[in-house]
Amino acid sequence: MQSRVWLAFNVELVKNKRDTQLRLDIMMRSNFSLKSVSCAILALLAITLSSACTNTSGPSEKIIEYARSATPENPETAEIYQRSCMACHGNGTSDAPLTGDKNAWQPRMEKGMDTLLDNVVSGMGGMPPYGLCMDCNAAEFQALITFMATPAQI
Ligand code: HEC
């Protein structure tokens, strides 16, 4: 009697073991396929992202070149521009919208001149308050913005 129970118990154990093995196997297999599916998704994402990046590449070499040398016609505006704004807006190395870069300025101009003036005065992102021109008045800022936002003729 005792040995029969022992045997039954053992058989049960073996069965359980096989069951567990089987379950483990299934889990591993589904895990594996899950992994490969997520890898495929990641790879696809990477491709999409990298092509998205190349599609929305920044200003062209020509615009960068234009921004480096462009300056307002009005000598007073030109003086302020060169002293205060050009270091960032004439230089392709910061996040500032480049002078003459239509794509960068269009969405900003759509906010309206008042908003732009407010943002220059209070500073925005990498731009310090007043765009570093502490004594500029609204008319001067407006002339500077209009100049920078005018698309480069290239
Ligand atoms: C130290 C660098 C720096 C200087 C100097 C600077 N800017 Fe900027 N400017 C930026 C950056 C960076 C942005 C983009 C900010 C953002 O989108 O977060 C910006 C954005 C702007 C915008 C767009 C604001 C908007 O609402 O989208 C205007 C207008 C502007 N600058 C005008 C000026 C004027 C005028 C001067 C000179 C008097 C000037 N900036 C000087 C860095 C600078």
Image: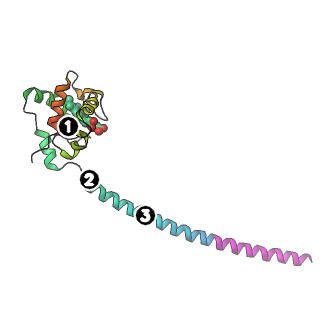
Give the quadrant of ligand 1: top left
Nearer the N terminus, badge 1 or badge 2?
2
Density class for disc 3 (Cα within 10 Å; few <14, some 14-19, many ≥20) is few
**Mark nearer the N terminus (3 vs 2):** 3
What is the three-letter code of the residue carrying label 1?
His
Which type of secondary structure does the marked residue at label 1 adopt? helix
What amino acid is at disc 2? Thr
- Where is residue 130? Give x, y as percent: 25, 27
Please indicate whether residue 114 sits to the left or right of residue 143 in the image: right
For the image, the number of numbered tags is 3
Q: Which residue is mark 2?
A: 56
Mark 2 nearby-residue class (10 Å; few <14, some 14–19, many ≥20): few
* Region rendered in magenta: 1-23
Based on the picture, tell me whether residue 3 belongs to the magenta stretch: yes
User: Residues under labels 1 and 2: Cα distance?
Assistant: 19 Å
Q: Is residue 144 left or right of residue 19?
A: left
- Residue at (24% x, 40% y) in the render: 110
Q: Which SS class for mark 3?
A: helix
Residue pointed to by mark 1: 89
Name the one closer to the observer, 132 or 143: 143
Q: Determine contact: label 1, label 2, CB under 8 Å.
A: no
Q: Please tell me whether the stretch drawn in magenta is mainly helix, strand or loop.
A: helix
User: Residue sitting at 21 percent across and 36 percent down?
Assistant: 88
- The colouring scheme, among rainbow, by chain, secondary structure or one colour, is rainbow
Q: Identify residue type, mark 3.
A: Ile
Asked if disc 1 is less than 8 Å from ligand 1, the answer is yes
Q: CA distance from mark 3 to mark 1?
A: 39 Å
- Residue 147 quadrant: top left
Image quarter of residue 46: bottom left
Q: Which residue is mark 3?
A: 41
